[in-house]
Amino acid sequence: MGIFYYSYLSYKAESAGTELVKVDPRNTSQMCSNCGSIVKKTLSERVHECPYCGFVADRDYNAAVNIHRVGMEQPFEPVEPRPLHHISVVQVLAMIAGKPRPRGAG
Ligand SMILES: [Zn+2]
């Protein structure tokens, strides 16, 4: 992990013709990916169920959609300069598509 992991993801992103986008993960699992409302949930809750719009999805799927959107549109707030959680757009797209993580593709 750490610097090596970041470099690896940068490399993977570049080789895929895209660029690595750092996303603050704090709200991605809480935010409804359908309507943007904050839906508080504990770590043990595996399903996102939005009381505002009725959207129901797997917690990780909902978070992946949020990460994808934030990464594409750029976050409203500056991401903290210290390393948080790095995920490549390619990985998010793979998660959304429900495909297994690419292994040894590079
Ligand atoms: Zn919603």
Image (spheres, helix red, strand yellow):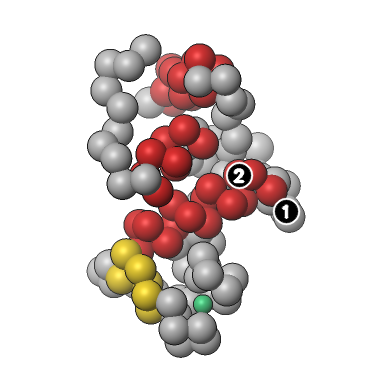
Amino acid on which disc 2 is placed = Gly
Circle on res. 71: 2
Q: Is residue 58 left or right of residue 71?
A: left
The residue indicated by pointer 1 is 77
> How many discs appear?
2
Using the image, determine if residue 39 lies above or below residue 96: below
Task: Describe the element under mark 2 as helix, strand or loop.
Answer: helix
In the figure, residue 29 lies in which quadrant? Answer: bottom left
Using the image, determine if residue 63 lies above or below residue 87: below
Measuring from the top left, give residue 92's x and y in whole percent.
44, 42
Say which of marks 2 and 1 sits in front. 2
Q: Is residue 47 left or right of residue 73?
A: left
Residue at (37% x, 75% y) in the render: 56
For the question of whether residue 7 can be seen, the reply is no
Using the image, determine if residue 10 lies above or below residue 21: above
Residue placed farthest to the front in the image? 97
Characterize the local packing of mark 1: few (<14), some (14-19) or many (20 or more) Cα atoms within 10 angstroms.
few
In the figure, residue 62 lies in which quadrant? Answer: bottom left
First reached walking from the N terminus: tag 2 or tag 1:
2
Q: Is residue 27 left or right of residue 73?
A: left
Task: Describe the element under mark 1 as helix, strand or loop.
Answer: loop
Measuring from the top left, give residue 37's x and y in whole percent.
57, 76
